[in-house]
Image (cartoon, rainbow, N blue to C red):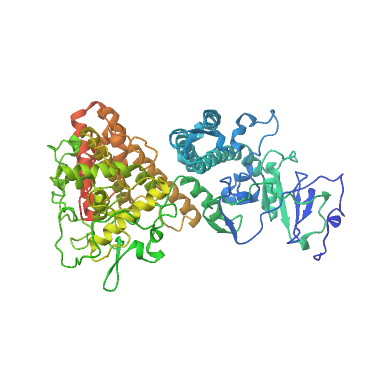
């Protein structure tokens, strides 16, 4: 046939008495643009196929993927994802098998949020949470026996585990971590996706795959309750038809000859949300609708649905160090004066090259020459003199206590260890995501110590909010300037930049001004008159939190470098499968780190009485075992007590347990030093 094939011609072989085969159609239609004809042997309606060789895959306003979403629209059949056509369609009747879990198809609304102290954030409301929890319980009730099988008996066990982990992560996050509506919406979608994928995989394994493999089967009944798929060859069309799944057979107009098509119909356009989100989500894949990489991209996005831009990839790594300053010709250029490309901060954070200028007073007078003026103590905070391998001073009432098994563990570091990865000349200046706790004890000036703490307490909330959106770490000298602003004053917009200290002062001022403008508009970047000075107990709490935040940050950054268990390219794994495997691996590592800290929810929300610093040994053991499991794939010789972590009686063995913990701590600090060339920050307790 030629391109003049019309709808009327599709029914020229119509014969209601003949049985409908997989090549025939209860209905048939023609794609207006491509002129392919499409038949369906087991449904009387036909959806429009998602044609195109360069389709952009990205989340829409409702956090779904439009007509490229396997939960919303039939996709081209992919044998590596053969369970996708088995996804249930939204139930329409109380008699439907899945009517009792219809919340898995419902979109979340802002009215479903329970408010918190932050008006822009909330958790999932009680009613919606109960419905989703009930749905998860039902799905797990069905998948539990399968997930308990050995891997040798169930080739899909890894898939079931992946979906189950997504349910756990999303349900916990939606229930306990205050989030923006955008994050809640994405979490609900991924939870629904994990549940429906699990149902589809179970039904494919138990019901549809046996039908596909049967030598002979009766003519299947009409298939109305499943998503189905688009196919373009006889083999796949026959498989889906035998299974009783909606089979949308796409063929070139020249292939039309003797097909028995009973009725014609227009192709259904997707009645889905196609609007772009604001701000728009990133495009995660460009290519054909049925490509392996497309479905792998969706699964990888599910595994990292709550991730932000990794702040660890530029953390004082030898050979990949990015200073806060760029050396130019005869001058030092701050980020604020650099081209836009010099800034690599998250799109969600302040844009450093468009910072507002300071308007407050400066300690410098522009009408006085200063090139040879001696530096004064007030203008230049003293350098840290304390031994970087020492614990925080035990005799200082502001310092939290060391964990017994971690006491002075940095002093056990072998600075010339045979497995050290950097030489002394390669070690770069330390960068920190929060103020280094040692800064507060580098001076014996009590006024300056309390001034640092007062300033940190003032900026803490807005800074941690910025960190959750992907802020980069800063040089220690920048932190020192930021915490000194209430002593030296903010940088004046017309100040002269003559020294590195001037550039740091200016950068610290402008960074905080942009930060407060974004997250706390109207507030000053330094405390107002007569600020509340932290008490000793408050100081210990603030510094203990800084120790934990730094420790968690450094632990995660080291794991990226030291972990040897990540999936690697091989002839036995496709690029698409490798992408999914890496995403799931990263999630498993993140969950281990979260367990170390008592399941805090995100990297910058920590509890000071759970996890590694809990009061009772039995309460700390779960966190320590996660720490032990995380480091098991790291290099270097393990302590003799390493396997003690497998002992089920360890919860009742305080002495041997502390010895085992000390071995973990020594192994950790040595590995950190081997990779970075300086000792890590250690966790402390109140």
Q: Please tell me in which quadrant of the rendered image residue 459 appears.
A: top left
Front one among 40 and 319: 319
Residue 538 is left or right of residue 560, and the answer is left
Residue 287 is left or right of residue 215, and the answer is left
Front one among 362 and 608: 362
Asked if residue 649 shows in the view, the reply is no
Front one among 37 and 286: 286
Residue 488 is left or right of residue 182, and the answer is left
| Residue 253 position within the rendered picture, expressed as x and y whole percent measured from the top left | 77, 61
Image position of 171 with respect to 511: above or below = above
Front one among 509 and 572: 509
| Residue 130 position within the rendered picture, expressed as x and y whole percent measured from the top left | 53, 28
Residue at x 29%, y 50% (from the top left corner):
558
Residue at x 19%, y 65% (from the top left corner):
370
The N terminus lies in which quarter of the figure? bottom right
Q: Please tell me in which quadrant of the rendered image residue 501 appears.
A: bottom left
Q: Please tell me in which quadrant of the rendered image residue 608 appears.
A: top left
Residue 590 is left or right of residue 129, and the answer is left
| Residue 186 position within the rendered picture, expressed as x and y whole percent measured from the top left | 52, 43
Asked if residue 83 shows in the view, the reply is yes
Residue at x 25%, y 38% (from the top left corner):
544
| Residue 440 position within the rendered picture, expressed as x and y whole percent measured from the top left | 20, 45
């Amino acid at each position: 046939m030629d391109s003049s094939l019309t709808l009327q011609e599709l029914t020229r072989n119509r014969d209601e008495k003949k049985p409908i085969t997989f090549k025939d159609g209860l209905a048939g239609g023609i794609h207006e643009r491509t002129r392919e004809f499409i038949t369906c042997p087991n449904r009387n309606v036909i959806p429009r196929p998602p044609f195109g060789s360069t389709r952009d895959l990205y989340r829409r306003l409702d956090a779904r993927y439009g007509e490229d979403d396997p939960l919303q629209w039939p996709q081209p059949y992919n044998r590596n994802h053969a369970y996708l056509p088995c996804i249930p369609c939204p139930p329409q009747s109380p008699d439907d098998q899945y009517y009792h879990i219809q919340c898995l198809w419902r979109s979340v609304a802002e009215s479903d949020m329970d408010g918190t102290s932050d008006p822009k954030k909330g958790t999932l409301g009680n009613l919606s949470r109960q419905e989703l929890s009930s749905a998860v319980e039902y799905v797990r009730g069905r998948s539990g026996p399968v997930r308990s099988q050995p891997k040798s008996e169930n080739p899909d066990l890894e898939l079931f585990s992946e979906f189950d982990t997504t349910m756990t992560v999303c349900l916990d996050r939606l229930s306990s971590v205050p989030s923006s509506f955008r994050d809640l919406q994405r979490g609900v979608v991924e939870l629904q996706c994990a549940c429906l994928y699990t149902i589809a995989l179970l039904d494919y394994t138990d019901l549809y795959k046996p039908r596909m493999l049967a030598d002979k089967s009766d003519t299947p009944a009409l298939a109305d309750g499943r998503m189905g798929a688009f196919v373009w060859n006889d083999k796949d069309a026959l498989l889906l038809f035998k299974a009783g799944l909606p089979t949308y057979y796409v063929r070139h107009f020249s292939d039309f000859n003797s097909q028995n098509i009973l009725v014609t119909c227009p192709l259904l356009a997707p009645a889905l949300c196609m609007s772009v989100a604001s701000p728009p989500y990133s495009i995660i894949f460009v290519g054909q609708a049925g490509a392996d990489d497309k479905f792998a991209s969706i699964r990888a996005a599910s595994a990292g649905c709550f991730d932000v831009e990794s702040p660890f990839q530029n953390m004082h790594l030898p050979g990949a160090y990015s200073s806060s300053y760029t050396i130019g010709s005869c001058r030092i250029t701050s980020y604020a004066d650099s081209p836009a490309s010099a800034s690599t901060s998250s799109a969600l954070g302040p844009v450093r090259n468009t910072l507002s200028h300071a308007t407050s007073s400066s300690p410098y007078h522009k009408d006085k020459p200063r090139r040879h003026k001696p530096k004064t103590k007030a203008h230049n905070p003293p350098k840290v003199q304390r031994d970087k391998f020492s614990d925080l001073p035990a005799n200082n009432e502001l310092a939290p206590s060391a964990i017994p098994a971690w006491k002075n563990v940095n002093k056990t570091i072998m600075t010339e260890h045979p497995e050290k990865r950097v030489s002394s000349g390669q070690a770069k200046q330390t960068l920190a995501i929060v103020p280094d706790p040692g800064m507060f004890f580098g001076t014996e000036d009590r006024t300056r110590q309390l001034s640092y703490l007062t300033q940190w307490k003032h900026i803490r909330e807005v800074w941690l909010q910025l960190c959750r959106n992907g802020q980069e770490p800063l040089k220690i000298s920048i932190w020192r300037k930021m915490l000194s602003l209430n002593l030296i004053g903010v940088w004046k917009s017309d100040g002269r930049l003559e020294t590195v200290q001037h550039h740091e002062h200016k950068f610290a001022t402008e960074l905080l001004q942009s930060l407060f403008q974004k997250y706390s508009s109207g507030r000053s970047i330094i405390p107002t008159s007569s600020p509340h000075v932290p008490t000793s107990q408050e100081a210990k709490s603030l510094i203990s939190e800084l120790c934990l935040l730094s420790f968690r940050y450094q632990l995660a950054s080291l794991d990226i470098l030291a972990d040897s268990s990540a999936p690697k390219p091989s002839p036995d794994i496709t690029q698409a499968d490798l992408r999914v495997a890496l995403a799931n691996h990263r999630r498993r590592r993140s969950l281990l780190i979260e367990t170390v800290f008592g399941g805090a929810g995100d990297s910058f929300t920590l509890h000071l009485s759970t996890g590694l610093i809990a009061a009772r040994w039995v309460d700390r053991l779960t966190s320590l075992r996660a720490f032990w499991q995380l480091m098991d794939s790291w290099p270097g010789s393990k302590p003799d007590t390493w396997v003690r972590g497998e002992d089920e009686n360890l919860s009742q063995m305080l002495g041997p347990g502390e010895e085992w913990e000390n071995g973990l701590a020594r192994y950790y600090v040595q590995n950190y030093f081997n990779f970075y060339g300086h000792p890590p920050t250690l966790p402390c307790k109140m």
